[in-house]
């Protein structure tokens, strides 16, 4: 199918373009409309996307065939599975987009006929999917409640469109749709709501006034639309709506009555909303269950999802569960205990792969929320323990500290961590400094530490001298006339980089400490020869 589309695009290679396109469209329609199980779901989705793309380029060839397929998808005889709901939503969005592109309004006859055909979907056929969530058409008198200022061109068709949106939202029942179809329908609902003026603040009004506020389908739609409209559009700009939404999502996530994908989605929503606060009393006297985080992630669907993803999710939810001002021993022990459990598979992976990335990402999520609390000391100790377990964590550790320095310039964590790392390098570097990769990591840590004026330069210079002597003895190499001519090119350049940082950061201290300056110049004299005079000039 991809090859046929590529040939069709290359028009100069085709003799009878329309004939080939017509055959291709027929073939794609056969794939999309296949119900005999020959074609898989992904191929049918791809075929539908090709059809939609082809209608823009060849409207005269595809219009009638696509109209027929649209009627087929909305007829009473069609088995309204999750696949056909996804196709229906995609087609509806496409029809709206094409009409707006052509006319700029809803006055297009072709679009009106499509929208008016929506009630042809038999309610008896879709009732098993909708459950108790089917919606009656919205009276015209209540349209002002749905949108503060709906466009005038929508007035004659908004009730039918709202009915269609309600049917699509009803199809988001967790037990009926796969995650793929779930998100497809959510995106379609979001685009339609935005198109008719229900996006932004109007979206909150539409969901909160016309639909049951704490209905699972509403929560599903809110979750699917969170990236399109933001927190303010979801009714979370005020504290009251924020708390109620958090309570509802938590109930869905904790209840075994809902399907696993929806429960996990609710957990991700709770972890991604920085303004939601658990552990508080909700409106109307309702309270969040006290062990909220444990209910959400204590035994979160074992055997279904990747354990690494679940551990990361657990850390984020625990960080959300305990407010930054909560410095109790219970909160700290719970958070750090979870981080320790997440660090074990990262250490087993040798400091590489997604386990290491997941651990440091979770560690940063905790620090970003609790950087003003006592967790800073625990996080610093955990960083030292991780790099002590495996030097391969150095890159992740440096990225972590760089992010902290950029996002929290007033934090003392980078300074304290680099101070301890300097001492750690001085103690441990003698064992494996002969290894080029290890040497590069040691030097990178020292170079970052040398950029902090609060860190005394003496330990850094002593460590440079120690590493220089170790490498010189290891390779039995006499002082080279030039770094580029020696076999210790990498080692020499790394040492010179650290020396340059020490000179630039601590020049005033070097002027008053003759011994320190002599040691540093000795390192430079050993590694930089006459051919490296430009380095002296740069320093």
Image (spheres, helix red, strand yellow):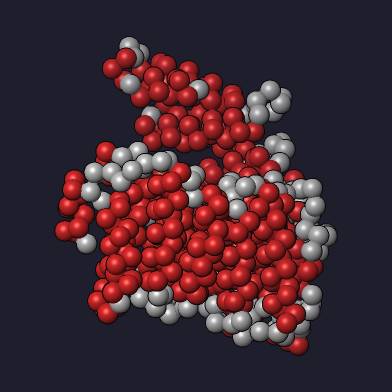
Let me know if residue 251 appears in the view: no
Hey, which quadrant is residue 224 in on the image? bottom right
Q: Dividing the image into 4 quarters, which one contains the C terminus?
A: bottom left
Q: Position of residue 482 (x, y in %)?
A: 24, 44
Let me know if residue 478 appears in the view: yes
Q: Residue at x 62, y 47 (%)?
A: 350
**For this rendering, which residue is in front, 361 or 116?**
361
Vertical position of residue 186 compared to residue 83: above or below:
below
**For this rendering, which residue is in front, 526 or 401?**
526
Q: Is residue 359 left or right of residue 512?
A: right
Q: Residue at x 60, y 59 (%)?
A: 388
Q: How many marks?
A: 0
Vertical position of residue 16 compared to residue 139: above or below:
above
**For this rendering, which residue is in front, 80 or 9?**
9
Q: Is residue 6 left or right of residue 400?
A: left
Hey, which quadrant is residue 21 in on the image? top left
Name the outermost residue toward the right: 256
Q: Residue at x 77, y 58 (%)?
A: 300
Q: Residue at x 71, y 78 (%)?
A: 331
Q: Position of residue 237 (x, y in %)?
A: 53, 78
**For this rendering, which residue is in front, 239 or 461?**
461
Vertical position of residue 75 compared to residue 314: above or below:
above
Q: Position of residue 103 (x, y in %)?
A: 34, 49
Name the outermost residue toward the bottom: 285
Q: Position of residue 510 (x, y in %)?
A: 28, 74
């Amino acid at each position: 199918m991809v090859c046929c589309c590529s040939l069709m695009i290359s028009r100069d290679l085709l003799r009878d373009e329309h004939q080939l396109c017509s055959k291709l469209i027929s073939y794609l329609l056969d794939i999309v409309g296949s119900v005999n199980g020959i074609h898989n779901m992904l191929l049918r989705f791809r075929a539908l996307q090709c059809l939609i793309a082809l209608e823009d380029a060849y409207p005269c060839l595809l219009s009638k065939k696509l109209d027929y397929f649209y009627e087929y998808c909305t007829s009473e005889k069609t088995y309204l599975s999750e696949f056909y709901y996804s196709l229906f939503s995609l087609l509806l969005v496409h029809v709206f987009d094409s009409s707006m592109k052509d006319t700029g309004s809803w006055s297009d006859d072709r679009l009106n006929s499509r929208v008016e055909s929506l009630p042809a979907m038999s309610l008896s056929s879709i009732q098993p999917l909708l459950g108790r969530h089917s919606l009656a058409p919205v009276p015209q008198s209540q349209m002002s409640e749905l949108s503060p200022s709906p466009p005038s061109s929508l007035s004659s068709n908004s009730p039918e469109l709202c009915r269609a949106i309600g049917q699509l939202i009803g199809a988001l029942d967790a037990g009926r749709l796969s995650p793929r179809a779930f998100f497809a329908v959510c995106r379609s609902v979001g685009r339609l709501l935005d198109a008719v003026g229900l996006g932004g603040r109007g979206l909150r009004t539409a969901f909160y006034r016309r639909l049951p506020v704490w209905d699972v389908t509403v929560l599903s739609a809110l979750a699917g639309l969170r990236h399109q409209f933001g927190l303010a559009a979801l009714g979370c700009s005020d504290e009251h709506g924020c708390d109620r939404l958090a309570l509802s999502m938590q109930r869905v996530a904790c209840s075994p009555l809902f399907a696993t994908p929806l429960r996990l989605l609710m957990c991700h929503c709770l972890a991604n909303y920085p303004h939601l606060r658990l552990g508080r009393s909700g409106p109307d006297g309702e309270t969040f269950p006290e062990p909220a985080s444990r209910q959400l992630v204590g035994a979160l669907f074992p055997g279904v999802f990747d354990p690494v993803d679940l551990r990361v999710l657990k850390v984020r939810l625990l960080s959300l569960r305990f407010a930054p001002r909560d410095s109790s021993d219970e909160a700290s022990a719970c958070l750090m205990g979870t981080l320790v459990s997440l660090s074990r598979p990262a250490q087993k992976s040798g400091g590489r792969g997604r386990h290491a990335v997941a651990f440091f990402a979770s560690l940063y999520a905790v620090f970003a929320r609790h950087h003003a609390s006592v967790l800073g000391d625990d996080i610093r100790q955990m960083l030292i323990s991780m790099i002590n377990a495996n030097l391969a964590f150095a890159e992740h550790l440096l990225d972590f500290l760089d992010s902290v320095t950029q996002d929290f310039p007033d934090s003392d964590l980078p300074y304290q961590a680099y101070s301890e790392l300097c001492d750690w390098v001085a103690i441990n570097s003698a064992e494996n400094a002969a290894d080029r990769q290890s040497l590069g990591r040691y030097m990178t840590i020292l170079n970052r530490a040398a950029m902090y004026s609060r860190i005394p330069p003496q330990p850094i210079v002593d460590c440079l001298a120690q590493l220089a002597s170790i490498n010189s003895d290891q390779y039995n190499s006499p002082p080279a006339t030039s770094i580029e001519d020696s076999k210790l090119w990498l080692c020499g350049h790394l040492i010179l980089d650290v020396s340059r940082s020490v000179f630039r950061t601590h020049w005033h201290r070097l002027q008053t400490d003759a011994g320190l300056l002599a040691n540093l110049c000795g390192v430079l004299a050993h590694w930089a020869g006459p051919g490296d005079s430009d380095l002296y000039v740069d320093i």
